[in-house]
Amino acid sequence: MSRAWAFLCLVAALAFAGSPWLAPGFNGFAPDQFPVPQENPPVQPAGYAFAIWGLIYAWLILGTGFGLLRRMDDVDWAPMRPPLFLSLAVGAVWLPVAQVSPVAATVLIWIMLGAALVSLFRVGDTDRWLQQAPVAIYAGWLTAASCVAVGLLLGGYGVLPATPAALVALLLAVAIAVTVQYRLHRAPEYGITVIWALVAVIVANAAPFNAAVEGLALLGILAILGLRGTDTE
């Protein structure tokens, strides 16, 4: 089964990286996909931040490919593969679903996050930059993205005004990130990726200036950085 999971993870990573071809031109949820149109919502990071997907796709393919070719039967790699496969397999269909239903897409991205975090906690001690690092940045970005989706739903369905919805989403993202980073005591790539997203939220809220969102995002960054001393390499 170890060989099968190694193969399946690579196939899933390739399918995940190829999924943008199934949804050409997708740049996030459209404002009119919600009953309350979400025009420039404060929860949304600046557009440049989404370029990290290219790094995530490439690193996951590199890592799973190395795992298949060089660590197929390695017991240190085996535990992290089933949940990683689940997350990537769901991710391969996420973009087409997101074009149709933000609610369904939000459910799927939380499944992706949960499976990715299980995989991250199961990664072994060998081949850090090819086993741990790609899963860490993937899980870190999913932490931010899944919470952004919640914020968009809260605002888009009129549950909360835009700024309170953003604050709830940011609190959730920071709470997850701090908990995960503290319990891991390793994989600083995870926290760094969440910080990347929080910095992009600060940039997006600079004009017009949103003090509440910017302040909370900054506090989140400081909280994650404060845990760096508990990490081990």
Image: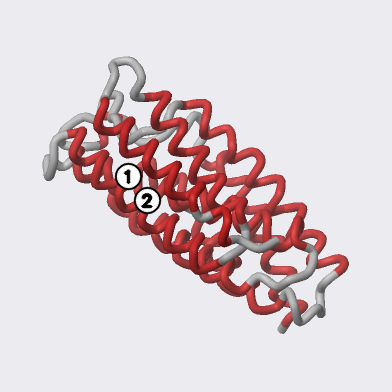
Residue 173 image label: 2
Residue 91: give x, y in percent of width and height. Answer: 51, 55
Q: How many marks?
A: 2
- Amino acid type indicated by mark 2: Ala
Q: Residue at x 22, y 37 (%)?
A: 34
Residue at point 32% right, 44% down? Answer: 170
Residue 229, labelled with which disc?
none
* Whole-number angstrom distance, CA of label 1 to CA of label 2: 5 Å
The residue depicted at 35 percent of the width and 36 percent of the height is 29
Residue type, mark 1 in image:
Leu
Point out residue 224 in the picture as x, y percentages from the top left corner: 47, 49
Residue 183 picture location, percent across and down: 50, 68
Question: Is 157 in front, or is 135?
Answer: 135
Q: Quadrant of the N terminus?
A: bottom right
44 vs 3: above or below: above
Q: Looking at the picture, does residue 230 appear above or below residue 2?
A: above
SS state under label 2: helix
Nearer the observer, 137 or 109: 137
> Which secondary structure, mark 1?
helix
**Frontmost residue, 68 versus 219:** 219
- Badge 1 local density, few (<14 within 10 Å), some, or many (20+)? many
Q: Residue furthest right?
A: 70
Image quarter of residue 156: top left
In the picture, residue 74 is in which quadrant?
bottom right
Residue 109 vs residue 165, the one in the foreground: 165
Are the residues flagged by discs 1 and 2 in contact, CB closer than 8 Å? yes
Q: Is residue 149 left or right of residue 6?
A: left
Q: Which residue is mark 1?
A: 170
Percent across and percent down for residue 73 are 81, 79
Asked whether, in this view, residue 32 is left or right of residue 136, the answer is: left
